[in-house]
Image (tube, grey):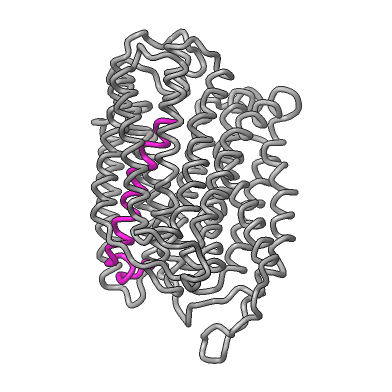
Amino acid sequence: MNDARHPDGTAATPPALSEPEKNIIIAGVLLSMLLAALDQTIVAPAMPTIGHALGHADYLPWIVTGYLLTATAMAPLYGKISDVYGRRPTIFAAIVIFLAGSLISALAPNMLVLIVGRAVQGLGGGGLFALSQIVIGDLVPPRERARYAAWISGTWAVASIAGPLLGGAFAEHAHWSLIFWINIPLGLAALAIINNPLKKLPVAARRHRIDAAGAGLLVAATALLLLALNWGGSRYSWLSPMITGLLGGSLVLWAAFALRLRHAAEPLISLEVLANPIVRYGTLAMFLVQGANVGLSVYIPVYLQSFHGLSAGGSGIAMLGLLLGTVFGATTSGRTIPRFVHYRRIAIVGVLLSFACLAALAFLAGRTSLAVLELLTIGVGFGTGMTFPVATVSVQNAVDQAHLGVATGVLTFLRSLGGALGVAMLGAIALGNGLPLGGEALQTASSIPASATAFTYIFAACAAATALSLLVFRLMPEKPLRGRAETEVAPLVE
């Protein structure tokens, strides 16, 4: 099952991949990414039904938290594993683990087993996010890689739209376990599609060891941080002993992880990768952009119900502007990057557009028309979408092939962590201004206060995070993109 290697541990040169084979692999890995993305959106509408069926409804948040904890923490670990053992066995393992978690969840007789199943799903799902981008990075040179970012954004958009619709339909008209059973045929189809073509995928790494101690510290530090972010301001106050204890414990573990990176013979994340300024600034920019983007996607529906009188379903449809704007922004950026020498400017333009629209939302909160709101959210999505291909291609182009997995894993990890932190921070702003949490507000729109102050602060906080990402993008160096000869691509623009 493993990729061919020479006796010295280096990868043997595999047969060349044809364009159809490359497209088949990309379709397969995007299908596997769709699996993981769906499982972040499909469960929420069915949670009341699951609580009624299994009991212990007070543990329902753990269905989401259990998946989030393991998926986020495992992303950088999968990058390293794939660099050591090859993409094919690693992505196969991630899909199999994900399907095992889906089976446990579908057959769960009680809430505890379901939470365990969701955590197992996350162990595989976290790898699917990172590995999909890593495999695309193996197949396509950086100059051409950006155009595939639209496919990735489209996959997320499909999951964002189809997930809630499928979850609600399964729970209402069939059985909630179909939410997890549907993963089995999709996962098996992904394995069948990518099995043979992936055998030809090269392995850049030589003999390496996995830093088990470093991996344990990373997972534990991330888990404590995410628990604090999920519980702070909702189950416990931010200054409670529980939250301060979790944050303090996470800080200690992060410090221990940093020491481990400095002193381990072969650390989990190469210091060479972390020292690269493009990787450092590119991942930080994605952390900030995703924090604003995910947080906005949680509170825009609340705003739509509060000030425009839309139902939960209507607000979901109105969110299409943000989602489709993101896809079109990523498509535009991906097609434009190969034409520009200074491709970083594309992200800067996107950030400026997103910031301007968010600032307008903050200024007009409570007194904007639905049409203006849609235009502004489309602008936010379009600007945000423009940044994703630039950051991904820049980070992957900054490292050699042997470190591609680690660099992409770090990018995926900070992107996921930024989303979790963004939702937590906006939740603290909402609660501090008398606005219920997103889930509570969606259940009873009548409970939302009429004051626009909370939304003004929420939109302003997203604008501030976007402004910080602009500064980070400005600090990020540019490196000429590797790829085909310039004569084979469109003329470059300064």
Q: Nearer the viewer, residue 404 or 54?
A: 404
Q: Nearer the viewer, residue 181 or 55?
A: 181
Q: Which residues are magenta?
A: 268-297
Quadrant of the rendered structure where residue 494 is? bottom left
Which residue does the image show at 42% across and 32% down from the upper left?
Answer: 379
Residue 88 location in percent, x, y?
Answer: 61, 68
Which residue does the image show at 28% across and 28% down from the upper left?
Answer: 460
In the image as oriented, which residue stretches furthest toward the bottom?
7
Q: How many marks?
A: 0
Asked if residue 183 is among those painted magenta in the image, a careful observer would answer no
Residue 305 location in percent, x, y?
Answer: 47, 14
Which residue does the image show at 28% across and 48% down from the upper left?
Answer: 249
Q: Nearer the viewer, residue 156 or 122?
A: 156
Q: Main secondary structure of the magenta part?
A: helix
Q: Check the image and report above or below for 281 versus 206.
A: above
Quadrant of the rendered structure where residue 210 is? bottom left
Which residue does the image show at 36% across and 36% down from the upper left?
Answer: 354
Quadrant that contains the N terminus: bottom right
Q: Is residue 356 visible?
A: yes
Residue 16 location in percent, x, y?
Answer: 64, 78
Apparent side of residue 150 relative to residue 260 in the rendered image (left or right): right
Residue 475 location in percent, x, y?
Answer: 23, 55
Apparent side of residue 381 relative to residue 427 in the rendered image (left or right): right
Q: Check the image and report above or below for 440 versus 231.
A: above
Apparent side of residue 340 relative to residue 159 in the rendered image (left or right): left
Q: Is residue 216 visible?
A: no
